[in-house]
Image (cartoon, rainbow, N blue to C red):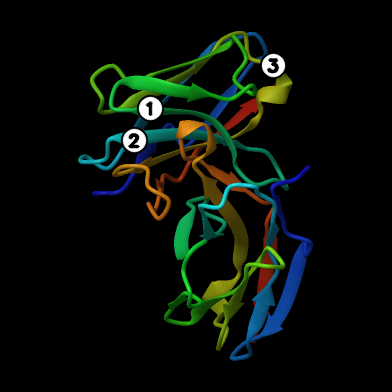
Amino acid sequence: AQKITQTQPGMFVQEKEAVTLDCTYDTSDPSYGLFWYKQPSSGEMIFLIYQGSYDQQNATEGRYSLNFQKARKSANLVISASQLGDSAMYFCAMREVMGGYSTLTFGKGTMLLVSP
Amino acid sequence: DTGVSQDPRHKITKRGQNVTFRCDPISEHNRLYWYRQTLGQGPEFLTYFQNEAQLEKSRLLSDRFSAERPKGSFSTLEIQRTEQGDSAMYLCASSLGGSLSTEAFFGQGTRLTVV
């Protein structure tokens, strides 16, 4: 079974509007961390935001916020006031510590296109 | 430049040849990770090092793949007898420690094309 599921292959949004990118995850580990990364065409993965499984409040970083619904195992990324430079691939990822190590497992990504 | 750097950025090789990629992590980072990303997919974990010790290898890392981090600084990933299925982006990342919240910093990747 997929540990991270991103059901939207592509999303379109107009500049200055908000957009939500979906992410659901699967784990039996009570301790885990959820990350969102942005990958522009240059290839580098850029960290955006982090949410811990025990965090009571949703994480926010500038225009990025994470809508964390633990019971539903979802961790959607909300980008407010989209900008043209937000056009990129977006990946949801999870870190677990089962087995004594902690590596990131990524979803397949969502391509976001922001139009003027 | 204090980020993660990878060399080369692009590599085209003939099937059956050996290739080696290099990753220079952020200097104080003790953990180093290798990921592979194929078209339309997210990065898939290959292996990681804590200092010079290779602590975990994915089943994706066949015996044609070998990674080293000899002095706990830079790392190399070698692929022997390359196959067309090895064509992918190879991403290196580093972090300071490995707690749940630890952010991994990625390089720009090495894009391998096997012809």
Residue nearest the viewer, comparing B37 with A60: A60
Which chain letter goes with mark 2? B
Residue pointed to by mark 2: B31
Q: Horizontal and vertical percent for residue B96?
A: 29, 44
> Would residue B56 be found to the left or right of residue B41 on screen?
left
Residue B71: image x %, image y %?
23, 20
List x then y, in percent, for residue A66. 55, 74
Residue type (three-letter) at the residue carrying disc 2: Arg
Asked if marks 1 and 2 touch (Cβ < 8 Å), the reply is: yes
Q: Residue under label 1, please give it.
A: B49
Look at mark 3 in the image and give the residue it sits on. B83
Which amino acid type is marked by label 1? Phe
Nearer the observer: mark 3 or 2; the answer is 2
**Vertically, is B53 above or below A102?**
above
For marks 3 and 1, give the one nearer the viewer.
1
Q: CA distance from mark 3 to mark 2?
A: 29 Å
Q: Quadrant of the N terminus of chain A?
A: top right
* SS at badge 1: strand
